[in-house]
Image (spheres, coloured by chain):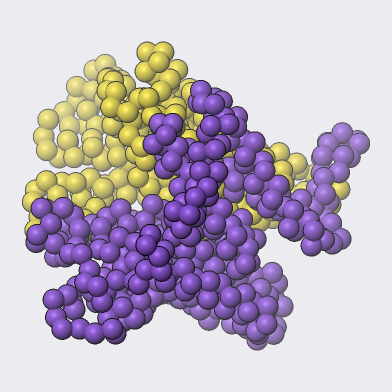
Chain colours: A yellow, B purple
Amino acid sequence: MTLLEAIILTVITASTPLLIAAIGELVTERAGVLNLGVEGMMIMGAAVGIAVAITTGSSALGVLAAILAGVGLAAIFAALALGLATNQVATGLALTVFGLGLSGVVGAPYVGLQRAGIGKIEVPILSDIPFLGPILFRQDPFVYLSIALVVGVSWFLTRTKAGLVLRACGENHASAHALGYPVLRIRFYATLFGGACAGLAGAYLSLVYTPFWTSGMTGGRGWIALAIVVFASWMPYRAAAGAYLFGGLTILQLHAQSAGVPVPSQLLAALPYLITIVVLVLIMRVRSQGAAGPQSLGTAFVPDR
Amino acid sequence: MRLALERRAQTTLAMQIASPLIAVALTLVSAVVIFIALGQDPARALHAYFISPVSDAWGLQEVAVKATPLVLIAVGLALCYQSNNWNIGAEGQLLMGAMAGTWVAIATHGTPNGPWVLPAMLVAGALGGAAFAAIPAALKTRFGANEILTSLMLVYVAELFMDWLVRGPWRDPQGFNMPQTVVFEPEATVPLLSDGRLNIGTPIMLVVVALAAFMMVRTLKGFEIRLVGEAPKAARFAGFSAKRLTWLVFAISGALAGLAGILEAAGTVKQLQPNLSPGYGFTAIIVAFLGRLNPIGCLIAGVFLAITFIGGENAQIMLKLPLDVTRVFQGLLLFYVLACDSFLLYRVRLIRGAAA
C-alpha cells in the first residue's frame, strides 16, 4: 500500500462519522428543527454501542443499540421542543449535557476494554484493482452506508413528495399546516432520523475508529457535524464534500504532528476548530442573503386548532 | 383525541416562582430513580449529594466559592439569551480571562510591585474575556456567522491555547515539569475573607448581581435588551440597533466570564493550571435558565448548582459514584426547567376529534 493510499483511507475513516451525523442533522433541520444535541446523541451511541457489543459479543447488536440510543435521546428532545414548544437551542444544549453525563455512567464499566473493530467488506475482484480497489471496494460497512445515506437523502428530499412536504414544514410551517400536513408529526420523525444517524455515527467511533470507550471520546465531532450542515447550505452532496474536507484536515493535522512540523502540537490540534470558524464566515460571505437555511428553522410551531 | 397546547392569557407571579421549584423537585425524584438503578441506597446518596455540602460551615464556604463563578457567568449569559444572542462559549471566555490576568501576574512576578497588581489582573481578566467574546460577536454582526457554533469552537481553541502556555512558555521552571505556572505572589492573589477559601470574589459577584438586576429593571438599556429579544421588529422601529446590542451583551458576558476565570486562578488555586474550571462556563448556561434569565434568580440557581458540584465530589468519594452522574442531573434539571417554563406560556388541552 502506498502512502497516498494510506492517507486517503484514513481520511475516509475520519470523515465517515462526521458525514453520517451531518446527514441526519440535515434532515432534521430541513424539517425546521434545530437540534443542537448531536454531540450528546453521538456519544450516547458510542457508549451504548460498545457496551452492548462487549456484553453480547455482537457488533451488529451494538450498532442497533447505538441507533436506538440516538433515537431515544432524540425522542426526549422532540417531546420537549415539539410537544411542549420549548426553546430549541436550550433544549439541544440540555440534551448534550445529559448525553455526555449519561454516556460516562453507561460507559464507566467498559473503560479500557479493547475489542476487535468491525472488519472491512472486500468486494471480490474489484478490490484487487490497484490503487482504486482498496479505496473504493475494501471499506467497512459504515462507509458504504454513509454514501448510500447521502444519495438516498438527496433523492428523498428532491425527488419524492414526502421530501417536498418535509421541506415545506421547514420553510414555512404555517403554510404547511394550512395545507393540512401534520407539521409536528413530520418534524418528530425528522428529529428521530437525526438521532438515529447521530447514534450510528457514535457507534462508528467506538466500534471502528477507536475500538474502545473513553469518556468524552466524540471530542466535539457532533458540533463539527452541525457546522458542516451550515457549510453545506443544507444540501446532502455538499455535506459529503464538507465532511471529507473536515476529515481531510484532521488527518493532515495528525500527519503534520507526527512529521515533526516545528509548530506547537496544540496549534495543530486547534486547526479543525479554527478552520470551522473560518469556513462558517466564508460560506456566509459567498452565499446570498436569501439562502440562509430553512426559513422556519429553530422556531416552535404551536397550531391554533 | 389529542393533546394540544393553548396559549395562556396571562402568567401569575406565583406560577413563575413555582416553575423552577417544581423543576428542582422533579430532578430530585429522578435522582432517586437513578440512584436505585445504580444500586445505591437513595437516602444515603441524596444525603451525600444535596445535604452534606450544606451541613457544616466549611461546606457552606465551598458552596459560596463554587457559586461565585457560576453566578458571575450566568448573569452575563442571561443578558445574552434575553436578547437572542446565543453565547455558549463562556468556558472559553473564562479561560481567556484567566490567561490575560495571569499574564499580569507573571510579568510582575519577582519584581518590586505594589497593591495595584491584583486590580490590574482583574481588569486584564475582564478585558481578556470580553475580547475573546467579541470574536463571535464580530463574526455574527459582520458576516452573519452562527454565534452558537463559533463561540463553542473557540472553547476548544482556548483550552488548547492554555494547554500550550502552561506546558510551554509559562511553565514553572521549579514545578517538576508539571503543567502549571509559578504560584502567584501574595500581591497577585485575591484576599481571603476567612480561614477557608472564601475570598472577595464572592462579594464582587453579589455587587454584579445587584448592578445587573438594577440595569434590567430600571434602565433603558435593560428595556432594550428585553425588547430586542421579545419583539425584534418593535425594537427596530424604536431605533434600537440589534447589532450594537449583540456587541454589548457579548462584551459584558465575556467580561464577567473572564473575571470569574481570573478570580478562580488568583483566588482559589493561586496559579494557572489546565484543570482550572470543572466546566463552570457550561454549567452556567443551566444556571441562567434555572434562574429564569433574571439576575436574582441566577444567584439562587447558582447556589443550587454549586451544591450539586460539591455533592458530586462527595458522592464520588463516599459512594464511588462516577462524577458524570452530576452532569446527568444537570441535563435533567435543564429539561425540567424548560418543560415547566412551557406550562407558564401554554396550557395543555385535551381535544376530542380527529388528529391533525
Q: Residue at x 56, y 53 (%)?
A: B304
Front-most of A245 and B7? B7
Q: How many marks?
A: 0
Q: Picture coordinates of residue B355 (x, y %)?
A: 83, 36
Q: Quadrant of residue B344?
A: bottom right
Q: Quadrant of the N terminus of chain A?
A: top left
Q: Picture coordinates of residue B303 (x, y %)?
A: 54, 57
Q: Residue at x 65, y 50 (%)?
A: B337
Front-most of B195 and B204? B195
Q: Quadrant of residue B286?
A: bottom right
Q: Residue at x 24, y 32 (%)?
A: A135
Q: Picture coordinates of residue B277 (x, y %)?
A: 36, 56
Q: Would you say B1 lies left or right of B119 here?
A: right
Residue B41 visible from this viewpoint: yes
Q: Quadrant of residue B288?
A: bottom right
Q: Picture coordinates of residue B306 (x, y %)?
A: 50, 53
Front-most of A45 and A244? A45
Q: Height in image: A30 above or below B146?
A: above
Residue B100 visible from this viewpoint: no
Q: Would you say B264 lies left or right of B33 here?
A: left
Q: Height in image: B75 above or below A20?
A: below
